[in-house]
Amino acid sequence: MNRARVMTQLVIDEGLRLKPYRCPAGRLTIGVGRNLDDRGVSEAEALLLLGDDVDECWKRLSSALPWLPGAPEPVQEALVNMAFNLGVSGLLGFRSTLAALATHDYTAAAQDMLESKWAGQVGARARRLADMVRTTQ
């Protein structure tokens, strides 16, 4: 079997859709006929998507916060995690937290994180990320 030729034919026959849609049989579908209702995605595919999402989040955050690429890795990782959960625009609403991080006041930043509405919603996640920030050297 010529895999590449079959794939080319399937793109022609099935179409290529980058957002979920309902196929004629009513199944949630994406890509080239991938039936999400019955098949879903594999762990490897989910992790590939996650990697792409993390890279996009990092790109957008680095653009919005020019000081971020020079920040310690725990701060970078905590902010990407928060932005993944809140969206970049949601994270940018944490003005006092970001101002504290920009001036290396990690204790104040962690406290601001824990006093937010977000912390009440995500519980242990907020405590873990605040600890990452607080213990940054």
Image: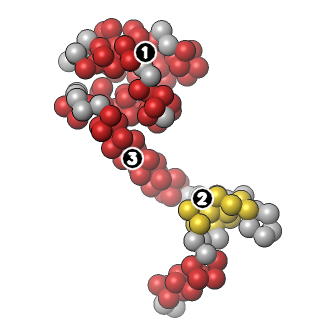
**Mark 1 or mark 3: whose residue is earlier in sequence:** 3
Q: Position of residue 70 (x, y in %)?
A: 19, 31
**Mark 1: which secondary structure?**
helix
How far, Cα to Cα, is label 1 from label 3?
A: 23 Å
**Mark 2 or mark 3: whose residue is earlier in sequence:** 2
The answer to whether 43 is drawn above or below residue 136 in the figure is below
Residue type at tag 1: Met
Taking the spot 31% from the left edge, 9% from the top edge, the residue there is 107
How far, Cα to Cα, is label 1 from label 2?
A: 33 Å
Q: Position of residue 4 (x, y in %)?
A: 47, 84
Crowd band around label 1 with a 10 angstrom C-alpha radius: few (<14), some (14–19), many (20+): many
Quadrant of the rendered structure where residue 13 is?
bottom right
Say if mark 1 contacts mark 2, CB within 8 Å: no
Residue type at tag 2: Lys
Taking the spot 33% from the left edge, 44% from the top edge, the residue there is 59
How far, Cα to Cα, is label 2 from label 3?
A: 17 Å
Q: Which residue lies under the disc numbered 3?
A: 56
Q: Is residue 10 left or right of residue 55?
A: right
Q: Which residue lies under the disc numbered 1?
A: 113
Taking the spot 73% from the left edge, 62% from the top edge, the residue there is 22
Say if mark 1 contacts mark 3, CB within 8 Å: no
Q: Which residue lies under the disc numbered 2?
A: 19
The answer to whether 104 is drawn above or below residue 23 in the figure is above
Residue type at tag 3: Glu
Q: Position of residue 61 (x, y in %)?
A: 34, 36
Question: Could you tell me if residue 134 is visible in this image?
Answer: no
Taking the spot 64% from the left edge, 58% from the top edge, the residue there is 20
Quadrant of the rendered structure where residue 27 is?
bottom right
Task: Please name whichever residue, 17 or 9, is drawn nearer the observer in this view of the structure.
Answer: 17
The answer to whether 100 is drawn above or below residue 4 in the figure is above
Crowd band around label 3 with a 10 angstrom C-alpha radius: few (<14), some (14–19), many (20+): some
